[in-house]
Image: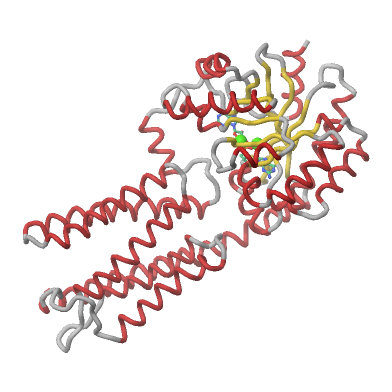
Amino acid sequence: MTAKPSLFKRLQQFWICADLGLIHNRRERRMRILASLVMLIMGVIWAVFFALRGAWGMVVMDMVLILSGLTVFTLTWRQHVRSANLVLFSVLLVIISGMAAILDVPNATAPRATHLYLLPLGVAALMAFRDENLGLRYGVTSLCLLIFTVLAATSWTPLPGYSLPDDVRESGTWVQTCAAMLMLFALLHVLQTDAAERSELESELQKALARKQFELYYQPQVDSTGRVIGAEALLRWQHPERGLVSPAEFIEHAEQTGLIIPIGQWVLETACAQLRAWAQIPSHRALCLAVNISQKQFCQSGFVAEVLALITRYEIDASRLQLELTETMVVDDMEDLTRKMSMLVEHGVTFALDDFGTGYSSLSHLKRLPLSKLKIDQSFVFDALTDANSETIIRTVIALGQSMGLSVIAEGVETQAQQQFLLNSGCLQFQGYLLSRPLPLEAFSAFTQAHNS
Ligand code: C2E
Ligand code: CA
Ligand code: CA
């Protein structure tokens, strides 16, 4: 039985980001944590400084900085990366521009320097919004550079008379310029290292596919009697130097580069070959195999034909193949999604909605989809016994599944207490470390034989 990690352990994982992906994700996460802490500390110091001088307008601005720092920290903690970035960049953009335009107005004695921070901010935005749409990817950086240009070329200020004294600004100019240039240098270095790592990972993934370094692990799914009813196929990369690499380290990158298409095809084909092999073994014959399908893969025009061709080629019972889609896919293109799902369902393939509860799919959307199963996301199971919201969400998902005639499986079940709670709430299928970790093929077969005979 796995105990719930202590707060210290969670903080440690939060910083190290142990299994959360690429090095650049980790680096970016740390940069966001540092930025939020700097916002908090600077906000407090400046608030005290200005409060002692009775400049209450500035104290209000510092409060905004403190609140924003807290918000960015919380959003990073909860892994809402996009929202954390949006808050971080909009607040910094407003505050730096405001300080440069109001407090740091240039004159013949002392030039302006605060606006220089807009340069590292623009470079950081290029990294943070790297995977966003074009508008965000280049929009934030362009805005930083535009405001920088206006502030560098004029002595314009919206509120004349609030500028700091010249002697403060004169010495401040050197400090600010050095700090901004150091930040710019550090960020350019990170940007360059990041690009090099990304292209290295891409070529490594291509080699991995060609050299057959990918492998499927199987995580048992059991019913309330402990019987194995199926498995989820989870991709692993047998890296020659790094050993077994988790998909969290490379799936996102494979999606961005399009490599997920050939990798996904390999997963589907291997899963179908496995179903065929299991059909020959009495204790394995009734197993269902769930396969994760990425959005890019599903959106391919030939996806349905590809799945049907594999079912025919391997002569498998299509109802043993379950495709796992995530909620984000449901929101994106309902028409195409429903059409493709229905075509596959007509041939017997079933669908599960993965990570259910974490997205924004509406009930009307859900009703239109030919789903068979809802998978309660592991984050709710993790908090089930300690957080009233998670508990309510779990009960609601189970009730929803029952009313829509869908089966419900809970993933990430780690303790007996969680399983008991789920069982009492009406959930009858489980997947998680309590029952078994994802296993290589032979170990999974032994596990199934032991539990199903
Ligand atoms: P997922 O689909 O949500 O898969 C469940 C993940 O939770 C797996 O991580 C599994 O090892 C882990 N897990 C299972 N039980 C427990 C538990 O009790 N506690 C905890 N903490 N974790 C548990 P894994 O194998 O690292 O996979 C991560 C993600 O990578 C998957 O999340 C899925 O989104 C993606 N993935 C894996 N294989 C494939 C694949 O073949 N194709 C695609 N497109 N994505 C894949
Ligand atoms: Ca899954
Ligand atoms: Ca999941």
Q: Position of residue 306 (x, y in %)?
A: 85, 47
Q: Residue at x 31, y 83 (%)?
A: 152
Q: Residue furthest bottom?
A: 108
Q: Position of residue 90 (x, y in %)?
A: 37, 62
Residue 283 located left or right of residue 127: right
- Asked if 215 appears above or below 187 in the picture, the reply is above
- Colour scheme: secondary structure
Residue 61 seen by the camera: yes
Q: Exactly how many numbered labels are in the figure?
A: 0
State the image quarter where residue 389 is shown.
top left
Q: Position of residue 156 (x, y in %)?
A: 25, 83
Q: Position of residue 186 (x, y in %)?
A: 39, 66
Q: Residue at x 59, y 44 (%)?
A: 248
State the image quarter where residue 50 is shown.
bottom left
Residue 371 located left or right of residue 150: right
Q: Residue furthest left?
A: 53
> Which of the four quarters of the rendered structure image does ligand 2 lie in?
top right
Residue 266 located left or right of residue 427: right
- Asked if 103 appears above or below 337 in the picture, the reply is below
Q: Residue at x 47, y 60 (%)?
A: 128
**Residue 362 vs residue 378, the one in the foreground:** 362
**Residue 331 vs residue 54, the one in the foreground:** 331
Residue 433 located left or right of residue 221: left
The quadrant the C terminus occupies is: top right
Residue 243 seen by the camera: no
